[in-house]
Image: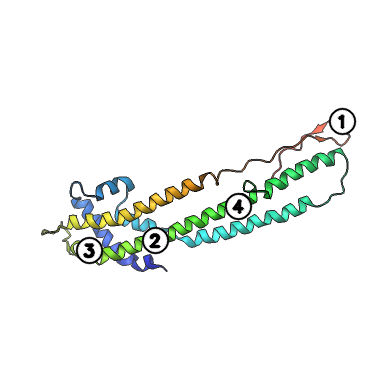
Amino acid sequence: MDALDHLAGPGADLLRRVDTLLGDAGAPAGHPVWPLLRRLRVLPGDALDAVLACRPAPLVAAAAATRTAGRAYDEVRVVLTGPGNWRGSAAEAYAVRRRALVTYLGDGPGSLAGRMTTTAGYADAVADWIGRTRGALARTLAEVLGSAEAVTVVTAPADGPVTGPVTGSVAAAEIGARVLATVAEAYDEVEALSGRWAAELAGVGQPPAGPPVPGPDGDGPVDAGPVVV
């Protein structure tokens, strides 16, 4: 469990009250919570639920498994680069295909092994973002739970906002704005992260087809077709 898990119970209770007040009484005109609500299209309590559902551990495990699978391509390359006993024009044509497949499997960042490494790196980057987002939201929750606005929200009557220097709706708007601002910042960060990785995560094409392979009697080419992995 991390800090966000420890604060999830009281945080969810407070934000449920915030959501109710915002839904029933709204927020003051021009309050910073409005653009955040329009942009994210989610109430503070739902935003907390969404972040709570994000866990870095599965992505870290997936990245490790992907790297392991990528290393398996090296074993295949060893087999493909080994000496063969086949001789003749067909053997030479197939050797060209085999070299193309070796390159496709593990030569450079555009190879399958390279793509596996890139995918694992992206998974690790997203996992790191999830961890930082959960930490940032935990800090925000800790602050709002101990705030005067939280006291006002908790003591607001069920049938409407309290009156006084700070009404229930104003207090709810203040808390909602702080929570949603944290989530919006995390959203901006992951958008930038996706943009940085987009080119590296582009798909892998088929290897070059290579020359036609002569038929067994030398009387014409045989289309060996694309290499399937």
Q: Amino acid at mark 1?
A: Asp
Q: Nearer the viewer, mark 1 or mark 3?
A: 3
Mark 1 vs mark 4, CA separation in Å:
41 Å
In this rendering, the answer to whether 147 lies above or below 98 is below
Residue beneath label 3, please?
Answer: 150
Residue beneath label 2, please?
Answer: 134
Query: Along the polypeptide, which appears first: circle 2 or circle 3?
Result: 2
Q: Residue 62 appears at what percent x and percent y?
A: 55, 58
Q: Is residue 112 left or right of residue 7?
A: right
Residue beneath label 1, please?
Answer: 219
Q: What secondary structure is marked by label 3?
A: helix
Query: Along the polypeptide, which appears first: circle 1 or circle 4?
Result: 4
Q: Residue 153 appears at what percent x and percent y?
A: 20, 61
Query: Along the polypeptide, which appears first: circle 1 or circle 3?
Result: 3
Residue beneath label 4, please?
Answer: 116
In this rendering, the answer to whether 210 lies above or below 103 is above
Mark 2 vs mark 1, CA separation in Å:
67 Å
Quadrant assignment for the N terminus: bottom left
Category of crowding for the residue at label 3, using alpha-carbon neighbours closer than 10 angstroms: few (below 14), some (14–19), many (at least 20): many
Residue drawn at x 26%, y 54% is 177
Q: Residue 107 appears at what percent x and percent y?
A: 68, 48
Mark 2 vs mark 3, CA separation in Å:
21 Å
Q: Amino acid at mark 3?
A: Ala
Whether the residues at callouts 2 and 3 have beta carbons within 8 Å, the answer is no
Query: Along the polypeptide, which appears first: circle 4 or circle 2?
Result: 4
